[in-house]
Image: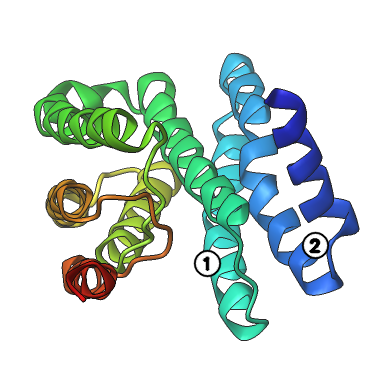
Amino acid sequence: MKSGLFTSVYYLLFKARRPVRLVNAITFFRVAVFPFFILVLTLNSIDIFKWLLLISFLTDALDGFLARKLKVNSILGSRLDSIGDDLTVLAGLLGMFVFRWEFLKTAWIPIVVVLGIFLIQTLYALFKYQKATSFHTLGAKTAAMLQGTFLCSLFFFDEPVYWLFYAALVVTALELMEEIVMVTVLPKWKSDVLGIYWALKIKSTEQQPEQE
């Protein structure tokens, strides 16, 4: 199975048509760069870390824009994108421990609450689909934008922007709860479902042949 996954990733990065290779190379950057985040954290270099984090978040916006413009879409690419997003946010959280410990000491409770909702959503999806979701909902895109803006501001500025912090947390929590509902609604794993409304439409469409 690992060999098949490696082969699929290799195809997306090196053998697929050029637009697919371009988009997935940008997406894969966020996955491949994670070990460098760990190295930079070990070296305690906030200057390198904050720029690496900013670049990583910008690639998220860039690959999404290019995927829509070039009409590039694949299940594996969608899953790589989700993994890259999660690893980038994880890098930001680890950066808090190293560079912004004083802030983390005052803000850890709401962060843990949202991480708990994320864990519930992930475990529920793994139980139902045997893999994590990759919905890329409108809420998820909004949450990612807020997360990226806040995390970058946290390391570029001396003082945390608290309203941005709480906005990111609230939108992320609501988006995760929406995905829990969507996992309940959709009997089979789907990628790139924009929200509950679209999930209900998919379910209704799939049920029509059965009713006939």
Q: What residue is at 10 percent from the left and 33 percent from the top?
A: 110
| 29 relative to 205, above or below | above
Q: Position of residue 74 (x, y in %)?
A: 61, 61
Q: Is residue 70 left or right of residue 11?
A: left
Residue identifier under label 2: 21
Picture quarter with the N terminus: top right
Q: Position of residue 183 (x, y in %)?
A: 22, 48
Q: What residue is at 56 percent from the left and 61 percent from the top?
A: 58
Label 1 near label 2: C-beta < 8 Å? no
Q: Secondary structure at mark 1?
A: helix
| 64 relative to 124, above or below | below
Residue identifier under label 1: 61
| 139 relative to 7, above or below | below
What amino acid type should be assigned to the residue bearing mark 1?
A: Ala
- Residue situated furthest bottom in the rendering: 69
Towards the viewer: 166 or 8: 8
| 171 relative to 48, above or below | below
Towards the viewer: 158 or 84: 84
Q: Is residue 24 left or right of residue 13?
A: left
Q: Is residue 139 left or right of residue 29?
A: left
Q: What residue is at 17 percent from the left and 57 percent from the top?
A: 171
